[in-house]
Image (cartoon, helix red, strand yellow):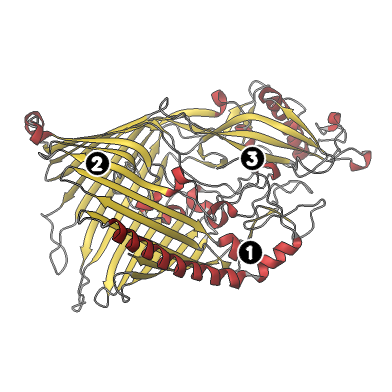
Amino acid sequence: MAQSLSLDKMSPQSIGRKKRNGVTSLAFGVSFLAMMVGSTTAYAETLAGLLDLPDDFWMGGRVTQGISMGYDRYDDGVGFGPSQYTLQLQAEWTPNDSITIVSDFWLRGDWFYRLDDGDTTQPTGLQDFTAPPFLNRNDFNLSQNGTLMFPSPSGSTFGDNGRRNEVLDDFEEDIIKELSIRWADPEGRAALKVGKFQRGWGQADGLRLLDILNPQDLRQRGIFTDPDDLRLPVWSAAATFNFEPLGISAPFEALGMDNASLEVVYIPDNRHSEFVINNPTPNDAESGGYFGLPFPRLVDGQSGFGLPLLGVRLFEQETKAFDDFEIGARLKFDALGGQMTINGFYGYQDLPVTHLRGATLHIGTFVNDPNAPGVVNVPLDGPTTLGAVHAPGQYVDFLQSLAAGTAAPGQFPLIPFGCLDILNPAAGGAPCSVTADVNLDYTQRQKTVGFSFTRDMTEIKLGRKNVSPVFRLESTYEFDKPFNRTIIPDPFIPGQFAEGTPALVAFEDVSVVERDQISVLFGVDFNLWVPFWESQRSSIFITTQFFNIYTEDSEGLTFQSPYVLTNVEKHQQFLTQTYSMGLLNDKLILDGLAVWDIDKGGVAYRQRIDFATFGPQWKPRIEIGHFSGNTEQGLLGSWRKSDYVEFSLTYQF
């Protein structure tokens, strides 16, 4: 999440022009697809002809353009949804039996902000400060800038223009999908791969346990992204050693471990997961579009009051290349009639914890706008900010007195700075607000061990075709996983506590704690032949998975900061279901994925319909994505208003 971005101001004329040009933008997207198909295919063919490429060189790629309608939005209406595109160019050269060189470049983006009519808003802006208990929130516009005035008239919004995801064009981070060279020993003893690539561990659907080497890209369609596109590639070196050709397999075979191999992955420059929080704070305004995560509710857990006049500016605290490396190892072997792995990973968390950095007092604006005319910005360091929030008579104390009905005019803590007393506006003074500076800390270590086991249960025969199911088991044990706390000791009053959002206004040694976490997956794969469906030409492949995530001493922990109102369950359980089937001689492919968050009550479902009626190159698809859940309750709840129906067209060459 790039921080300190300036607002891209839009005039009323430009906003009106964008509304009128929605259809034109749609036509432009279709034209773009046709143009890129032609130019990219022509480029690949021309390059192959000019270079007289040998038989051991392959080049290909794809161009995809989607257009979607969003439904069940925050306004309960229907409008444009994600309209994502992909241009991908791949090449592979194998000059001999030992060397393989792979390049894979792609350009992605989303036309959503251009197509949207400017009416897609979420009630996820700053807390409305106009009336206690300050639980109402001003609207946040996903696709254009907005201006909030005081008092807040109906229809005025915070917002950002949403252009961040229009083109993911950072060459090193976004465009290089793979750039690697692999050497394999002719005798099959060892292999070494160096470059930028991804490594998939584990086979979980919808969620992941062992697949932790690569962070995730949640910017485009969250967990509904295909696994190969969801993983973010990293610069790595991966070495594989096959024990039998090396002549060292005997001790392992004595333990019942056949065909053993060891993979070691070294990552010198790690990377964290990518996502965007829709931030309404004017000096850090950000929009992630349709799949941007909502700005968290700012609520005092004790009084139940929202936190008025407070914005948040986010800073990424990241690791350093080579100094902060990651390393993983996987021992793979056959045992007990199946395939097993033993895994270990020593790296960094790819999702953050948060802690206090400082703050800025804005004298002259109610809405945290540091650039408004006449505004005076007063920087506050960390200890001063801590006192301004938690000390007796200060922000939280005043808010709780207001909730209890004991607050009186003259007690508003910002009055000494010449600020308006919100309990006695007639006394005069300047409008004021505060922006808290918060670190998104990605420097916490991840220490995980685990194992997996997969076995074809040939002893069991089911259905009219006597098909055997496949049993899958994955488990991880993570040591000292960091969590933010939902409740902390009051920094100034012994025996008292701060709860809810105020618990995040603390330094790392107070707000972050560590707990061990154990995760287990039980899964079954099965090729289903439907009873009495005699004309069924191919099986329906289904997989069912149950997850249980146990967190030690989970009480008072935040599920994922900064969403402090969502607690960690002692046993967090999920159920996932997938199916894939072909119809009409496999000219029509149906593929479904369902995820159920049993404890938080969230449900997500993705249905794909692929058409294979236009030859091997043209691939039309209809995709339906649906989320339901409670506000800010787990990841599925964060996307509860991100439903869409998409039509996409892919050309492969």
Whole-angstrom CA distance, mark 3 to mark 1, is: 29 Å
* Residue appearing at x 84%, y 41% in the figure: 431
In the structure shown, which secondary structural element does the residue marked by tag 3 occupy? loop
From the image, tell me which residue sits under label 2.
182
Q: Residue at x 46, y 61 (%)?
A: 85
Res. 2 image quadrant? top right
> In the image, what residue type sits under mark 2?
Arg
**Residue 563 in view (yes/no):** yes
User: Left or right: where does residue 307 sit relative to residue 328?
Assistant: right
* 644 w.r.t. 183: above or below: below
- Crowdedness near tag 3: few (<14), some (14–19) or many (≥20) residues, C-alpha within 10 Å: some
Residue 422 appears left or right of 554: right
Badge 1: residue crowd in 10 Å (few <14, some 14–19, many ≥20): some
C-alpha distance separating marks 3 and 2: 40 Å
Q: Which of marks 1 and 2 is in front?
A: 2
Q: How far apart are marks 1 and 2 (CA)?
A: 52 Å
In this view, the residue in front, 589 or 49, is 49
Q: Is residue 276 left or right of residue 42?
A: right
Percent x, y of residue 235? 37, 38
Please determine whether, in this image, residue 245 is positioned above or below residue 123: above
Circle 2 SS class: strand
Q: Is mark 1 on a helix, strand or loop?
A: loop
**Residue 4 bears which disc, if any?**
3
The residue that mark 1 highlights is 75
